[in-house]
Image (cartoon, rainbow, N blue to C red):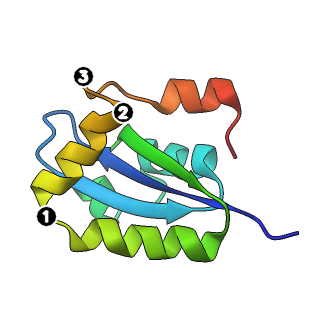
Amino acid sequence: MERGGYIYIITNQNHTVLYTGVTSNLIVRIHQHITKFYPKAFTAKYNCNKLVYYEGISTIEEAIEREHQIKAGNRQRKIELIESINVDWKDLYPKVVELGLD
């Protein structure tokens, strides 16, 4: 059975940085960002620890393709994508944990 994936966008407290990523385990990956598991990573350097958007994709290959689409867009398109599901830019990580999305 093929495993799916997630694309996600995280930001910092002031929403000045938007980072788009892909993962097969959303809970673990966002936790790594929050705890700065990789201290030299871009997200650690810019304090990106707030999950503002995610999308479940049926295969990891399709998730990677979707990540490339999002990264190719400009900041305004990313903002529109975020606000299509999260107008108030709330941190979605607690909901992800509650839902048990892996």
Disc sitting over residue 1 in the figure: none
Q: Amino acid at mark 2?
A: Ile
Asked if residue 53 is positioned above or below residue 69 in the image, the reply reads above
**Front residue of this view, candidates 72 and 9:** 72
**Element under label 1?**
loop
Q: Amino acid at mark 1?
A: Asn
Q: Could you tell me residue 96's position as x and y percent? A: 58, 32
Kindly identify which residue carries mark 1: 74
Q: Residue at x 53, y 24 (%)?
A: 94
Side of 84 relative to 100 (left or right): left
Kindly identify which residue carries mark 3: 88
Marks 1,3: beta carbons within 8 A: no
Outermost residue to the front: 84
Q: Residue at x 49, y 64 (%)?
A: 22
Residue 92, picture quadrant: top left
User: Quick one: label 2, few (<14), some, or many (20+) residues within 10 Å?
Assistant: few
**Element under label 3?**
loop
